[in-house]
Image (cartoon, grey):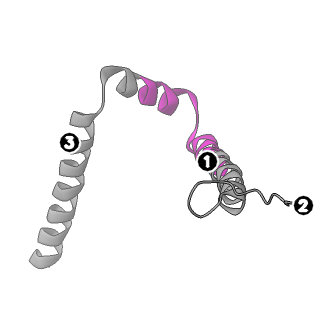
């Protein structure tokens, strides 16, 4: 029983320390923004917004990967383009 309480306390302490480190890295504006988000939007809405943001980033990644692949296909190996000229 005591071991269970100790483990629980250690887990809670680690969570608090992670929150403290995170809060030290955030600016006052970011803190105010997240406080507003938590006050205005319910958890389910925030969850959907997070998923939507992830999908937008995945779309951007797919777009960039597409154009990077096109550049790699069209790019000569040594960076120079060669042209064949026939001489009569």
Residue 28, image x, y percentages: 31, 21
**Residue 88 marker:** 2
Q: Nearer the viewer, mark 3 or mark 1?
A: 1
Query: Which quarter of the picture shows residue 82?
Result: bottom right
Which region of the structure is painted magenta?
33-55
Residue at the spot of label 1: 57
Residue at the spot of label 3: 20
First in sequence, mark 2 or 1: give its number: 1
Q: Out of 83 and 20, give the one closest to the viewer.
A: 83
Q: Residue at x 58, y 33 (%)?
A: 41
SS at mark 1?
helix
Q: CA distance from mark 2 to mark 1?
A: 55 Å
Residue 54 is one of the magenta-drawn residues: yes
Q: CA distance from mark 3 to mark 1?
A: 28 Å
Q: Residue at x 61, y 46 (%)?
A: 44
**Residue 15 marker:** none
Q: Quick check: 88 above or below 37?
A: below
Crowdedness of circle 1 by 10 Å Cα count: few (<14), some, many (20+)? Answer: few
Q: Quick check: 45 above or below 18?
A: above
């Amino acid at each position: 029983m005591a071991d269970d309480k100790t483990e629980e306390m250690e887990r809670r302490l680690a969570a608090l320390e992670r929150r403290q480190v995170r809060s030290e890295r955030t600016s006052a504006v970011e803190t105010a923004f997240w406080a507003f988000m938590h006050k205005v939007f319910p958890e389910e809405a925030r969850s959907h917004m997070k998923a939507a943001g992830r999908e937008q980033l995945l779309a951007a990644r797919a777009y960039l990967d597409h154009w990077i692949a096109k550049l790699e296909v069209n790019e000569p190996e040594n960076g120079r383009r060669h042209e064949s000229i026939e001489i009569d």
